[in-house]
Image: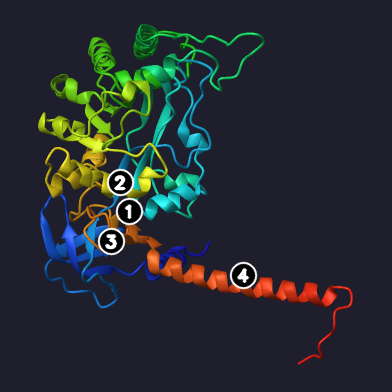
Amino acid sequence: MKSMKPFLVACLFTASSLAAPPIVIQNATILTVTRGTLTGSILIRNGKIEEIGERITAPADAQIVDATGQFVMPGIVDCHSHIAADSINEGSVSVSAMVGIEDVLNPEDIAIYRALAGGVTTANILHGSANSIGGKCTVVKLRWGKDAHDMIFEGAMPGIKFALGENPKRAGNPSGQRIGAANVLRYPATRMGVEDVIREAFTEAKAYQQSWKDYNDKVARGEQAIAPRRDLKLEPLVEVLEGKRFVHAHCYRADEILMLLRVADEFGFKIRTLQHVLEGYKVAKEIAAHGAGASTFSDWWSYKLEAFDAIPYNAAIMTRKGIVVSLNSDSAELMRHLNDEAAKTMKYGGLSETEALSLITINPAKQLAIDNRVGSIEVGKDADLAIFDKHPLSNFAKVEKVYIDGELYFDRNKDLADRAVHEADKKKLLDKERELQRRAAPGAVRRPAA
């Protein structure tokens, strides 16, 4: 048998020769979020930030990006999104922990590209809010053009969606249709019923967890034992109890927020984030004591009954009370201008520029436990960066380029140029088609060939 060594060496050489060259972004105002602001350069190599400084010696093979007059910030992280999911609500039951967003990711959703155009690089794709306990969530990087599997954020902690209030308690079937002469009534139909569903589900999960512990203990002792029947609905809840899966809970009112915190404390798990949490300012002390994060809106108000007590100072008040706060989109449209949403907290609550930017970068990264990888511009972190033509907190700022893992996924000028070429080609085809139709028309005068 011939040696494989020459073949392996050749493969390694080919791989290294095809590796992307390093990138140096020069002359930019760099908003690191966690390390202050400076004017200088960023060296990207192998998808990571290798060096940041006022003066960087560019490698001979580096691709130079001149960002004179422009601003570089960490890629925006959205802690609550539903884009790229073909379906988000399994509303036929109140506990649907067995279903998962990962199985319905749609990498061709145009909202991915549009979010990139707004500087977003990472998103937490959540199940909907039709259930007291909904489906499993998936954190993704917006790698436009890749397949669904390659969008998944490697190593991110999995999550699960809970929901309180009007959405899970509403009467009728999920689509609001009538079956026969009357609406179908699905339990729960009240706020106290929502609490009961959650409490009952975790009571079952604890019993299920104990049955597996008893089985494993018997096996460890060498005893014969029959394994418990797998329950795909309860397995994710056991992961919650064991700290292996985060809970992201849709909520609005202060009373229901306190209810969920009490239930979580009773069963020994933590709520990772309270989503929307529009009355969080009323119970900020209790949220901070529990250790939950809060992912809210900047100034949404009065769009439903539960939102009437919302105030634009909510994010700032919770921040001052020691809660890790983020701003999320919950909307493919809002996702395109989260930087503008962050700027509002400077007006309503007096947050600093850095604190405002933190709401859409390092704070949501902390809430998703991915802040060791993204959320700030630091050496060793993933090169997920957004370049703006003006300060990102300006209403007039536009995203020029977006990098994920050091790869360029959005380039405004290139896309505009490509669009112009496409429009020109389309015009030529239309002109040709019209000319053919004219020639084919009855009585058309044929022109001599040129």
Amino acid under disc 1:
Gly
- Name the spot of residue 15 as percent of width and height, x first: 41, 65
Within 10 Å of disc 1 (Cα), the crowding (few <14, some 14-19, many 20+) is many
Tag 1–tag 4 contact (CB < 8 Å)? no
Residue at 22% across, 38% down: 366
Q: Quadrant of residue 82?
A: top left
- Give the Cα separation between the discs numbered 4 and 3: 31 Å
Residue at 17% across, 74% down: 57
Residue at 24% across, 68% down: 25
Judge from the rendering whether residue 431 lies leftward or rightward of residue 157; answer left or right.
right
Residue tagged 1:
119
* Mark nearer the N terminus (2 vs 3): 2
Residue 247, label in figure: none
Residue tagged 3:
387
Tag 1–tag 2 contact (CB < 8 Å)? yes
Q: In which quarter of the image is residue 242?
A: top left
Amino acid under disc 3:
Ile
Secondary structure beneath dot 2 equals helix
Residue at the farthest right position: 443
Within 10 Å of disc 3 (Cα), the crowding (few <14, some 14-19, many 20+) is many
Amino acid under disc 2:
Leu
Secondary structure beneath dot 3 equals strand
Residue tagged 2:
338
Secondary structure beneath dot 4 equals helix
- Give the Cα separation between the discs numbered 1 and 4: 30 Å
* Mark nearer the N terminus (3 vs 1): 1
Tag 3–tag 1 contact (CB < 8 Å)? no
Within 10 Å of disc 4 (Cα), the crowding (few <14, some 14-19, many 20+) is few
Q: Quadrant of residue 281?
A: top left
Residue tagged 4:
426
Q: From the image, state whether disc 2 or disc 3 is nearer to you.
A: 2
